[in-house]
Image (cartoon, rainbow, N blue to C red):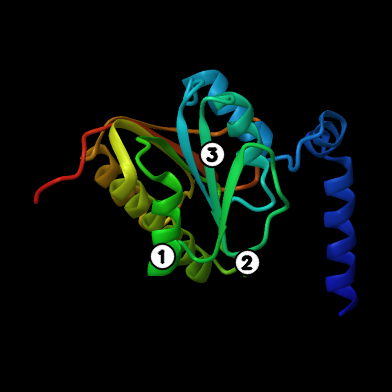
Amino acid sequence: MPKKRSSSKAWLKEHRDDPFVQRAQREGYRSRACYKLLELQEKDRLIAPGMTVIDLGSAPGGWSQVAANLVGHRGRVIASDILPMDTLADVEFVQGDFTDVDVFERILAAIGEAQVDLVISDMAPNMSGMNAVDQPRSMYLVELALDMARQVLAPGGGFVTKLFHGEGFDDLIRATRGEFGKVLTRKPEASRARSREVYLVARDFKGRQGG
């Protein structure tokens, strides 16, 4: 028990001392993760004014906050998470598991007639510290997000998701390359160096295959 308490203290100290945490507090962002999306935006120009963006696993709302600022008043951000999320201006929030039919239908109802230009996901499972458990869980979330993207994206749309190096990584990249014209991975500066996470950036969705 004392060991767990000391590791929690170390994490809290690292969190408080983190320059991205401090910067987020100064600049009014909900989380340090905002800077990951901002860097991806700077490099890849993913979000433009007037776009419709779906944010999966959105709580506490950092990525939705960034996306809403970038799409402007003519654009739309529709966010969804199992967890509650405090209200954000210009963001429509649907609480629930987006793989449940009723939640998915509510997201579709929120989208309405709009063309979805981009699906973003910063989802990760609760980490156990055991790679044999954590990697399959994280890959499952990525596959769910990709499946949602397949169903709602307009041809030419984009998809961005957190991805962890490990089993299933190469297969997922290959599958995504079959469905998008351009696929790459990035490691933003705000992503901690020791983390295996990278971000998959997929552009130019080819459209739903078959039937």
Q: Nearer the viewer, mark 3 or mark 1?
A: 3
| Front one among 54 and 130 | 54
Judging from the image, what secondary structure is the residue with disc 3 in?
A: strand
User: Earlier along the polypeptide chain: callout 3 or callout 2?
Assistant: 3
Residue 209, percent across and down? 15, 45
Q: CA distance from mark 2 to mark 1?
A: 26 Å
Q: CA distance from mark 3 to mark 1?
A: 19 Å
How many angstroms separate mark 3 from mark 2 (CA)? Answer: 33 Å
Drawn side of residue 204 relative to residue 45, left or right = left
What SS does tag 2 mark? loop
Can you say whether 44 is above or below 20 in the image?
A: above
Q: Residue at x 62, y 66 (%)?
A: 126
For residue 129, which numbered disc appears in the image? Answer: 2
Q: Residue at x 71, y 48 (%)?
A: 87
Q: Position of residue 197 (x, y in %)?
A: 55, 46
Q: Tell me, yes or no, whether the two marked residues, 3 and 2, touch with CB atoms within 8 Å.
A: no
Query: Who comes first in sequence, dot 3 or dot 1?
Result: 3
Three-letter residue code for mark 3: Val
Question: Badge 3 is on which residue?
Answer: 77
Please, what is the three-letter code of the amino acid marked with disc 1?
A: Thr
**Between discs 2 and 1, the one toward the N terminus:** 1
Residue at 36% x, 52% y: name it.
148
**Does the rendering let one see residue 190?**
no
Of 145 and 39, which appears nearest the observer? Answer: 145
Q: Amino acid at mark 2?
A: Gly
Residue 204, given in percent of the width and then of the height, sits at 29, 28
User: In this image, 184 relative to 86: left or right?
Assistant: left
